[in-house]
Amino acid sequence: MLNQTLVTEFILLGVTDIQQPQPSLFVVFLAIYFVNVAGNGAILTVVISDSKLHLPMYFFLGNLACLDICYSTVTLPKMLENLISTNKAISFLGCITQLHFFHFLGSTETILLGVMAFDRFVAICKPLHYSVIMNPRLCTLMAITIWTIGFFHSLMHSVMTSRLNFCASNHIHHFFCDVKPLLELACGNTELNQWLLNTVTGTIAMSTFFLTLLSYFYIIAHLFLKTQSCSMLQKALSTCASHFTVVLLFYAPVLFIYIQPASGSSLDQDRVIAIMYTVVTPALNPLIYTLRNKEVKGALNRLIRRKL
């Protein structure tokens, strides 16, 4: 499969096309990466260690924290290396591997956010049946299914991209290997690859986004029609606010890049937007959840007191 191409390595041009080392950007992105790993690592630690957080909502939050760490780790370390090095090469196999794990973790997170919205729907609209519906066995099965779908969706892209011929330039106008920039470099017919990207990836993104919006529509309708207490209404809306903020931060740039046709976007624009969902959003997620969630803040305080 790999010997069909004349290109044995690619050159990642990075965040900008400037080839000189950029230590200032290195410091900025290293700091963001540290915040990401520390914040999501803290959430993952308290979710696992604190028995009060052994609930479906926090089980999925732990999955999200794990995904955010891995998601940024797929792209950021190589980008950081390229910011302080003049050698920006990545092997063909390394490029396809990065593409695979990027789409694996990204599509898994997309589906996970939809499942987290469904969990909030059941908790608020069906509170008496919540423990029966969202039982540990179902939650574990849903998590395994989410990760499995993400893996095979990504495998489709990595296999189909690796079968393309790259016989022209090997300069990727991006800071990581993604399908769209690679299709720009491929010679031959890429219509099937583009169709898979727009149709399959678009369907996964749009269907989970629709599920999320539908869940929140029913939640809001239920709260305003059935809830008489303002304090209960405020508490329920506050519980959903963190997740909905994360959904908006994640989906807005992803849908902008992958739903529109390749001809309708510029690679420079795609690079800027990609920084949002690969670098900034994963670092913001733990801040959003800890600042708005009393249970997570309480668990973090208990963990810090035990360590001290």
Image (tube, rainbow, N blue to C red):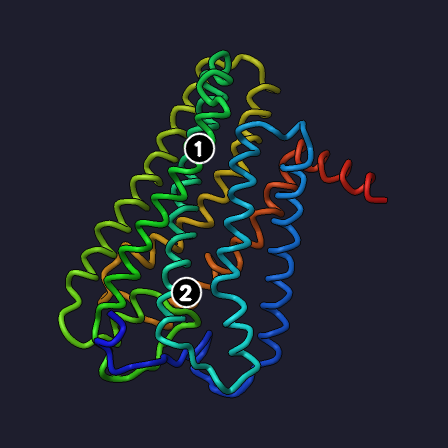
Q: Position of residue 142 (x, y in %)?
A: 41, 33
Residue closer to the observer: 221 or 25: 25
Query: Would residue 149 appear left or right of 124 to someone viewing this image?
Result: left
Task: Name which residue lies at 68% across and 36% down.
Answer: 49
Q: Quick one: label 1, few (<14), some, or many (20+) residues within 10 Å? A: many
Residue 91 circle label: none
Task: Name which residue lies at 37% across and 34% down.
Answer: 213
Q: Position of residue 109 (x, y in %)?
A: 43, 46
Quadrant of the image for the C terminus?
top right
Residue 117 circle label: 1
Read off the residue under disc 2: 98
Outermost residue on the right side: it is 308
Judge whether 84 appears above or below 37 on screen: below
Q: Position of residue 83 (x, y in %)?
A: 54, 78
Task: Name which residue lies at 36% across and 80% down.
Answer: 9
What element does badge 2 sit on? Answer: helix
